[in-house]
Image: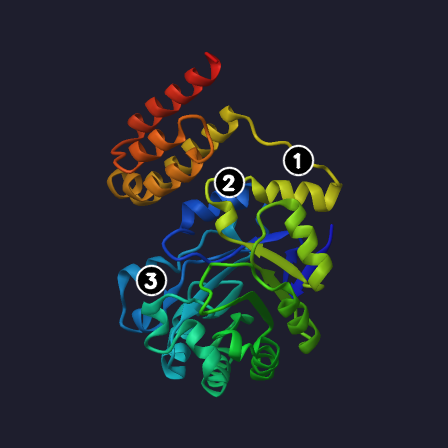
Amino acid sequence: MDFVTIKNVRIKRTCALSPMASVADRAYRTVCREFGASLLTSEMVSAKGLCYSSAKTEELCLVTDFERPYSIQLFGEEPKFIFDAVKIVNTYKPDIIDINMGCPVPKVVNPGGGSALMKTPELAFDIVKAAVAAADCPVTVKIRAGWDDQSINAPEFAALMEKAGASAIAVHPRTRKQMYSGRSDRSIIKAVKQAVSVPVIGNGDISTYADCERMYQETGCDLCSLARASYGRPWVFKEIEDYLEHGIIPCEPTLEQKMETMLHHVSLLIQTKGESVGIREARKNVAWYFKGLKGAAAMRQRAGSLTSLDELKMMIDEVLNAENND
């Protein structure tokens, strides 16, 4: 089994789960870890929110031992707030603290955070330096290719982040202007790998075990990570692990196995958040699990108004009965 080491943190060199705001909560992360995700990352945590003692923000930092190795990701545009937030995050004992400089959404970018920091390398340097000074664990940085096609600066930017003390760089090779559209340019990840001596995590357009293998081969990255490909498909991590470690070409899970995983996932959500909140937050996950199945459109529409675990069990029975009667 191959491993990559980020400072003192040893991680299986298979595939990590990328941070996803409002998606990768504890239940989501737990299911992905059960299927072999090698590194988990929290939802994005606001540095200011932590410093102003937001209970909701603090909840995002909680971690169980099962989730380790585990990274808490912070976002913000002011070094002082990042420094103070990292001091608070230390109390949760993450294995890694990640600084988000890749998020493209307006509410993060407009104040100057996320991928807007790709336009202000000096400020980004000060932010990472502040985080490293405060942290009790390795600090990593998530970046994009650049702001737009005219300002692709990932290799130079990554080298500066390494100089500031970053222990690894994660690269999503789209520009901020692209958001999540179009194809990512893996040559940018390769260029970042050549520009730094710390580990590089390659991210973007990994949907299958074959995509993951190509990412390793084409970029020379030290670790791969994926996000949206795990929507309703947490078993993608096991498929990648089985292929990379054992050369096993995976088979698609059976319908029964998919429904069992979905029910387990939703049950975890309810355990951690209570049925009222848990079932409401489960609706998007349920819709993702039904995607591609027979009658998926109707089931996904019903998922949007799901109100109880019993209702979900009835939907599962309907899907399985329809399959068995074909």
Q: Residue at x 41, y 83 (%)?
A: 79
Q: Is residue 298 visible?
A: yes
Q: Earlier in the sequence, mark 1 or mark 3?
A: 3
Residue occupied by mark 2: 233
Per the model, the C-alpha gap separating discs 1 and 2 is: 13 Å
- Label 1 vs 2, first from the N-terminus: 2
Is residue 7 something that shows in the picture? no
Q: Is residue 278 above or below residue 188?
A: above
Q: Residue at x 50, y 46 (%)?
A: 230
Q: Nearer the viewer, residue 159 or 287?
A: 287
Q: Is residue 87 above or below residue 163?
A: above
Q: Are marks 2 and 3 in contact (CB under 8 Å)?
A: no
**Disc number for residue 228:** none
Vertical position of residue 261 compared to residue 318: above or below:
below
Mark 1: amino acid: Pro
What label does residue 58 carry, if any? 3
Q: State the separation of the CA atoms marked 1 and 3.
A: 39 Å
